[in-house]
Amino acid sequence: MGVFGAMQTAITGLRAQATALGHISNNIANSQTVGYKRSDTTFSDLVPGSPARQQALGVVQAFSRPTNTVQGDITKSEVRTFMGINGDGYFIVGTREDTVDGLPVFSDEDLYTRRGDFELDRNGYLVNGAGYYLKGLAVNATTGNVTGNVPDFIQVTNDFLPASETTQIEYAANLAATPKTSSYDPAVPNSELLTAGSYAVDPRAAGVGVVQATDNTLFLSESIAGGAVTGFDALGASVDVQFRWAKIDSVASGGSDTWNLFYLSDSAATGAATQWTNVGQDYTFNAQGVLNPSLPSVTITGLTVNGTALGNIPLIHGAGMSQFADSSGSATITDIDQNGSSAGEFSGISVSEEGRIIASYTNGRVVEVSEVSLASFLADGFLEKADGNAFRQTIESGNAILSSQGKLVGAALEASNTDIADEFSKLIVTQQAYAANTRVISTGEEMLQEVLNMLR
C-alpha cells in the first residue's frame, strides 16, 4: 500500500474519532437525564487478505458500546410516584397514539426504560417525563394477590372508597392484679372488687349483666378504664365503643381471680335504662396470670352503642390477655383496633418497597392497586435505542423476560451513569487522536508533493 492507502487509513481514523466525539458529546449532553445510559466507543480494524509477511494496511471502524447494565446513582425524591431501579431490569412502558373523547389510545408496542420520573396525568395514568405510560399487573384489593400475567397500563381512579363495616375488634391488655379503683382502700380487704349487691340489678355476667344509669357513678368507682375504639356501621357512621373492666372475684376472697368486661351502650341513659352492658364472659386467671380457660376470642352479641347497631362482633384476644402485678393498678392496653372504616376520598399514591402502587384515602385506608412490572433481557447491550431514553427489543437482545433481580425504590430516581470527569478525559484522548490522523494526511500530502516535484 502506498501513500494514498496511508491517507485513506488516516481518513477512516478521522471518521472513527469523530464518531467517538459524537458519543462523548451525547453523554455530556445527557449527564442530567434521568436513567440515561452512556454510550462508550470501541474501535475495530478491517484488513484486506494478504500474506502474513506482506500484510496490507487496513482501515478502522468505530462502534458504540452501550452501558445499559451499568448502574446510575439512586437519589431520593420528594415526589412519591418517582421510582428508581436498583440493579437489573427495565420499566415496561407504552406510547399514546391518539386521543378519543379525551381518553388516550395506546400503541400495542412495548418499550423499556430506566427513566422512572412517573406522575399521574388527568386520566389517572402514570406517565414519565418522556411521555411514556407505565405498565404493571393488577392487584386484587381483597386478597392482595396479583391477577393476570400480562402487564397493562396502570390507571388509578379517584373514586371514593366505600365504607367498610366493622366485623371484628382486636383487643389485648394486661389487667393489674389489684385494680386501684376509686373505691379501693389498701386497708379494706376486697375493696378492689365490684360489690354486686349494691346495684339495682346484678351487673355480673352470671346475672342480668347490665348497669343501669342510676348505678353509673358507683360502677365507675368500682371499675377501671379499658380503652376505646371507633367502629363503623354499614354506611360508615362512626360508633365509639368504650370498655371498662371490673374485678368480680379474687383468690384472696376465697374464689378465683375473675373479671368482667363492659361496654358503654347508652351514654345518655337515665333512670333504670341500661348504660353499660356486660360482654357476657367471665375472664378467669390462674396463679401465673394466664387465662384459664384460654379465650382466643369472645363474641359481643348485638353490640349497640347509642342506638347504632354493629351486630355480633368477635373480640379477638389471641394470647394477649394477662393479669400481672402493676403498680399503676390500671389496665394496660397493648392492642385495640378494628377492621372497619368510613368512606374515604382519594388523596394520593405512593410506591411500596415491593414495587406496588398504593392508593391512599382520607379515611386512613390504603389499597394496593397494581404491581409495577420489571423486564430483563439476556443481552441488554443489543437493545435498540428509542427517543426519550427508551429501548426496543431486538432479535439479538432476545425477548423480554417478565422478571428481574432488580429492586424498585419508591420516591427515588436513578441518575445518568455519565461521569463528566471521565468524559473529559476521553475528550482529550479523542482530540489528540484526531489531530494525529490529520498529521498523517498532511504528511502524505507533502510526500505526494515531492513526487510531483520530481516531474518538473
Image (cartoon, rainbow, N blue to C red):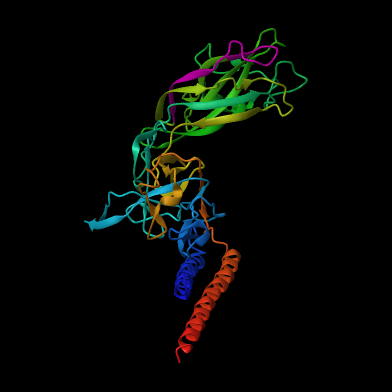
Q: Which residues are magenta?
A: 283-305
Look at 53% across and 46% down and name the residue there. 87
Look at 50% across and 23% down and name the residue there. 315
Look at 52% across and 54% down and name the residue there. 414
Residue 77 percent coordinates (x, y) = 53, 56
Q: Could you tell whether 189 is left or right of 455 in the image?
A: right
Q: Nearer the viewer, residue 200 or 425?
A: 425
Which residue extends farthest top? 254
Q: Quadrant of the C terminus?
A: bottom left
Residue 63 percent coordinates (x, y) = 45, 60
Q: Is residue 88 above or below residue 173?
A: below
Q: Could you say which quadrant of the image residue 306 lies in?
A: top left
- Does the image show residue 102? no
Q: Is residue 8 above or below residue 312?
A: below
Q: Could you say which quadrant of the image residue 190 lies in?
A: top right
Q: Nearer the viewer, residue 456 or 272?
A: 456
- Does the image show residue 265? yes
Q: Could you tell whether 376 is left or right of 215 in the image?
A: left
Q: Is residue 54 above or below residue 228?
A: below
Which residue extends farthest front? 455
Which residue extends farthest left? 101
Q: Nearer the viewer, residue 23 or 442?
A: 442
Residue 162 percent coordinates (x, y) = 36, 39
Residue 310 in magenta stretch: no
